[in-house]
Amino acid sequence: MTVKRFTLAAAILAFAFPSSQAQVTTPSGTPSRSDISGKRGDDIETIDLSRGKGVIAISGDANSMGTCRIKTEGKRLGQNADLETHTAGHCLPSTSEVFSADARYGYYITSLRVCTSRAPHEMVTGIEIESRIVDNASGPGDFAPSERDWGRHCDRWHRWSSCDPGEVVVGLDVHITEPPEETFGGNGYVTGITALCQEVIAKP
């Protein structure tokens, strides 16, 4: 990513949203998938927000065996309303939140990357996000400084899973590995996350 690239994108989008009365949304259809951050798992659970919403927060829950669930929160683009939450993964009892990153008020996540523990069980132990403001007057705007949080055993930060200019994260592919039951007590653990992206467009 470069400042020049996103400055040009912002100028194009400002032209596309000239009216202060405009509303923004996302197109109908399937989101595009970015590159994975982290490791591929045995299974993939997909989180996909309703049309016209973007992800504003990502967190991870863990128990004594490790990170076993990812939670997202999203809301309507350009509005502080219509919140929507989803989870992927499964945990046995006695879980707690071990990392969480939230976009600023009015901002939506555009990129993410994860931190994982060491081999052999390389599981997600932290998250870093980048986000940008989206409003109904001009569509996507300025970026916020990145936000990151991590729990124990954060050993390696992986490459970014990023949306293209003019897009926001509207869902996630959560990669989960299912080890033998005697190893992790029947719990799977999260190994990687992929951003699902859609363009911000003027509402018809």
Image: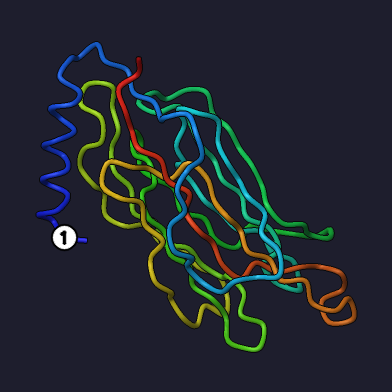
Q: Quadrant of the C terminus?
A: top left
Which residue is more in the foreground, 138 or 65?
138
Q: Position of residue 156 (x, y in %)?
A: 46, 81
Task: Check the image and tell me how it is coloured.
Answer: rainbow
Q: Position of residue 19 (x, y in %)?
A: 18, 14
Q: Position of residue 193 (x, y in %)?
A: 54, 61
Q: Position of residue 34 (x, y in %)?
A: 43, 57
State the residue at coordinates (28%, 27%). Answer: 135
Residue under pointer 1: 2
- Location of residue 124 (image quadrant): bottom right
28 relative to 9, above or below? above
Is 57 positioned to the left or the right of 119 in the image? left
Is 4 positioned to the left or the right of 21 in the image? left
Which residue is more in the foreground, 130 or 23?
23
State the residue at coordinates (84%, 58%). Answer: 93
Q: Amino acid at mark 1?
A: Thr
State the residue at coordinates (28%, 22%). Answer: 136
- Residue, far top: 21
Query: Tag 1: Cα neighbours inside 10 Å, few (<14), some, or many (≥20)?
Result: few
Label 1: element kind: loop
- Location of residue 105 (image quadrant): top left
State the residue at coordinates (56%, 74%). Answer: 39
Q: Quadrant of the N terminus?
A: bottom left
How many numbered marks are there?
Answer: 1
Which residue is more in the foreground, 96 or 1?
1
- Residue, far right: 182
Is 2 positioned to the left or the right of 36 in the image? left
Is 201 positioned to the left or the right of 45 in the image? left
Which residue is more in the foreground, 22 or 185?
22
